[in-house]
Image (tube, rainbow, N blue to C red):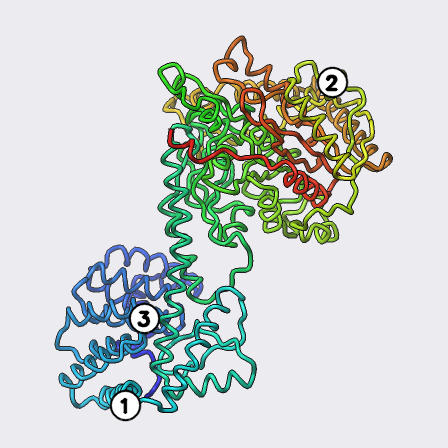
Amino acid sequence: MSMFKWKRKAESSFTEHVQKWIESSADDQDENLSDSEVDCVTWVKRKKTLCLEDVATKVERLKNEGILFAELEKYSESIERFKTAIELQPNDGRLHEMLSQVFLMRGEDFLAIQAAERAVKCCPDWAEAYQTLARAQLNFGELNLAVESFRFANSIDNTNEEIEQELQSALLLQAHSSRLHDTNGSSSERNLINFQHGIDETTKALFEKKILLQTLPRTLILNVNTIYSVYSYTQQHLFLHALHTVSMQVRVMIIRRFTNLAKVEQKKLIDRVQHSVALSWKVRDLNIFITETFEDALAQVVNLSRKFCNGEERKHPLFGLPIVVKDCFSTKGVRTTLGSKALENYKPNFTATVVEKLLQRGCVLLGKTNMDEFCMGTSGTNSYFGPVKNPWTFEVWRGKFDKEHNLENDWYITGGSSGGSAAAVACGISEIALGSDTGGSCRNPAAYCGVVGFKPTYGLLSRHGLVPLINSLDCVGILAKRVKDVSLALGMSVYFIKKHQHFMTLSKLKCLLNLSTLFHMQWRVWIGKIRRWLIEFYTPYLSADVVKYWKLISSILEREGGCKLVELSLPHTRFSNVCYHILGCSEIASNMSRYDGMEYGYRSNDEISFPSMLTRSRQESLNDVVRQRILAGNFFLLKNNYDKFYVKSLQIRRLIYEDYLRVFNDQTVDVLLTPATSSDAPLYSQLKKDHYNCIQERRDDYFTLPANLAGLPALVLPVGLSGQNLPVGLQFIGKHFGEKQLLQLAQWLETRLSFENLSQDLMKI
């Protein structure tokens, strides 16, 4: 039987068609124009002509373009052209038949059958439509149906030698298949039985062992490009010999085994995403999402399962994992609001690098999470789309939900500004979430929500696509339930691209490989413990629960982890709050100047003048916190204030950096252990009393800001519950590019503590 080839149905080639079309419009051109100028004008006029062409002309053009793309093996473009043409003329059987051929060339046999059946329905007396249907059915393994279709095509056109030849080949296969069923004890049947186990092992190895040695030849009747052999060299020849002996039975059996395993895997992926979507609906009152992409997530799952069916290897454990992303990362075609009215309907035309890397590795995006407006805040309550609410409220108010205790009147805050991402992980909606960390925006909500929050060394992860707040401090943050998940996400996101690097070299990147290596007891670490507690990290506002766990974890590390505790001092830490806000407000004032409402973003209806429109737009679209920081930054950058404030703050930042450099290098300290927040999560009602929001923000920023100012990696790990049954987290700060050491220590400690995450049963309240 001859192999399937593209059947051209057009009377002339597409290039001739285009050439005649261009020549027909050449009369409208200027005779004095050069060849290059004529081409340019021709393209412009051609575009106008396309807008005015009738349906028949457009369908003919789309058909010819589809044929051309199919010949060039650009099947996606070809399918798109034919589908567009079918929308215009749905009863044209030729278009359906050509679409079926393209599906066959692409290996999508079931879709080819569907398209061919529509062609037969539109043109019941067309022999070539039945011929294409028969070929699709044969490729799909339906031998009897293919024979019937070939017979019908031959009865319509008995002069077509190609149809007659293909019918005879199909009949021979049918007879051979019947003999295999009727004959007992034949060598062919024995081969079939002996190789049934081999087929199971083949598909199992394809899915589980990821062994890829040899594909079946394309000259076989069935197109089973995705089935692979995992036998030795001699066994491969025996296996292929058996395939030729019992070709149809074995191939059909392979396809069925392969299809069943693919369906099982697809069901697992879909169930995983549907569970996350169902859980998201249960906790909608927490206001976790700004933009939900549940439908796109299910489409991603179908695409992943299709890759799985095509035999692509699963190279990492993130395949099919649902993730959420803070709404400050650009995502192509999905709105990126930054929690502000100013960007309420903004949709980027590209995707952030770290998000794209995770999606390429099979992660499924569920949506964009809520956040403080433009990442300015540590409470999660400053969003234009409403505050995010801590899911641990369910645990504290277990059995007490009534008119006084409900999420409309009061709740425990999540922290910020990555509050939505932390809440999604705490609820179990996703195991991994992306956030940003400029001054603790990832670690602060991690401590309040009882999850792991990680900030890498400044410059380790690409900031391309992360909308800037403070360029010199912004970092991509990772939140997860377990340290192992943080390691996996970090390992999949780290890569070296020259245009994205800051001060990272390729040699430093190589030392970060194998981030998921487990901590071993033989490995020893020195934990730095602050000596002058009352002045530095032991603030008067530190709660008794935080102090208790700080001392407890120190003793565990010393007693069980083989760590040595040393006392040290970081004298310039007390200036970190002032230094951060002066530098931060100055850069914020510069970065926020782009939101003028001209090219994108919110624009006021005030058309008196540009300054008036700009002023009204910002007043109407930005909250008080954002406007205050813009005003403060402009004040610090005034000519008379620049040296007094901005330059002085840069000098203080350098002193803070040198303090940490001295501790890690001169005093041979590997990791610092500090509080992450001053207390457990406060109530929203408490936060709003007497400007407590600003006070609480300064108190909590004090513990997280130094790591950003020094560009150091830091991790917050939940270590226990407070007296109110709320999570308490502690912070580990490591050396520059000391992520591996930091994650090893945190993972070891995590196994010793066995912190219990929030139960999903509470989400039913």
Q: In which quarter of the image is residue 711?
A: top right
What residue is shown at x 41% (from left), y 45% (from top)?
333
Looking at the image, is 697 positioned above or below residue 506?
above
Looking at the image, is 701 positioned above or below residue 310?
above
Q: Is mark 2 on a helix, strand or loop?
A: helix
- Label annotation for residue 172: 1
User: Does label 2 or label 1 sit earlier along the sequence?
Assistant: 1
CB within 8 Å, label 1 to label 3: no
Camera-side mark, 1 or 3: 1
Residue hosting label 2:
644
Q: In the image as oriented, which residue stretches furthest toward the top?
A: 690
User: Does label 3 or label 2 sit earlier along the sequence?
Assistant: 3
Q: In the image as oriented, which residue stretches furthest toward the front?
A: 185
Q: Is residue 144 visible?
A: yes
User: Does label 1 or label 3 sit earlier along the sequence?
Assistant: 3
- Label annotation for residue 109: 3
Q: In which quarter of the image is residue 218?
A: bottom left
In depth, the one of 300 and 342 nearer the eye is: 300
Q: What residue type is disc 2 on? A: Lys
